[in-house]
Image (spheres, rainbow, N blue to C red):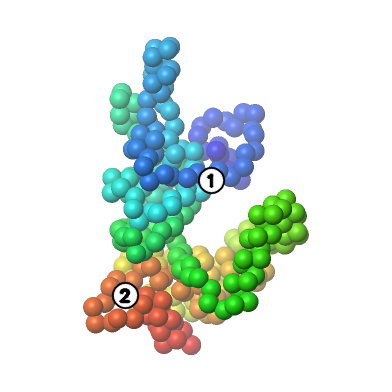
Amino acid sequence: NCDPGVGCAMGCGCAGTTFVPVPVIDLPLGASEDRLVGALDLERALRRGEKAFEPGLLARAHRGFLYIDEVNLLEDHLVDLLLDVAASGENVVEREGISLRHPARFVLIGSGNPEEGELRPQLLDRFGLAVELRTPQDIPTRVEVVRRRDSFDRDAAGFMARFAPQELAQREAIIAARALLPDVETPDEVLTQAATLCQALGTDGLRGELTLLRAARALTALEGRAEISLADLRRVALPALRHRLRRNPLDDSSSSSRVERAVSETLP
């Protein structure tokens, strides 16, 4: 799918342009390499004698979302493929007499239980933000979660209609933020403090600083402001950096605690 804002990315001239929903593609743990990257279309080859390419999940996820449940259990050879595509934004297919490449730019979303296995650091670093989900411990929150789930099970259509105004308001806020995003300014002080924070935490490479600034810029635009502040860095530091820390055998504290401590020490 080509981006309507930048013209055709596939060299097709965008004849007869059709707008399609943003794709959300699931990558099953048991998926084969052929299903992920694509392969020869055997049906056309056998029936018509034609050599044609059957797109894989990476092609279907272009300009959309690729979701992996239990991503920490994904096979190593699939992880290697994802790393290559994530770095280049292209999927290169060389197999069964087929040689081609196509754009494959997508937002990678993964979920998993850390107790079942750790994620390779190379892939973990490709995720921009990381959040931890825990069971709520306060009674009012637990009651409200159960109430909403029960309400959805009883009448899904009515439940969605009840929250439709909130969803519409959020949608409009996001659309407005996307329009404002290119004009958000980043002061030199914010850049310096972002680099100082990442250096204090010992993150590898510069992806930590880049993600930190992108998240802060998105937050600024969402709230309708024109300039990133240090307060924005503080608010996005935890999800942007907690998964990028190397293990410290002399420090038993969690990665979240280490980020919070570094934020309090480096960001005035």
- Rendered residue at 61%/67% (across/down): 145
Q: Looking at the image, is 159 positioned above or below residue 45?
A: below
Residue marked by disc 2: 202
For the point 43% across and 52% down, which residue is it?
A: 69
Distance from disc 2 to disc 1, alpha carbons, whole Å, reads: 34 Å
Vertically, is 108 above or below 212? above
Question: Which one is earlier in the sequence, the residue at label 2 or at label 1?
Answer: 1
Residue that extends furthest to the top in the rendered view of this protein: 48
Type of the residue with mark 2: Gly
Residue 77 visible, this orientation: yes
Q: Secondary structure at mark 1?
A: strand
Tell me if mark 2 has few (under 14), some (14-19) or many (20+) residues whose alpha carbon lies within 10 angstroms of its own: few
Residue 85 visible? The answer is: no
The numbered mark at residue 24 is 1
Q: Secondary structure at mark 2?
A: loop
The spot of residue 211 in percent (x, y) is: 45, 65
> Foreground mark, 2 or 1?
1
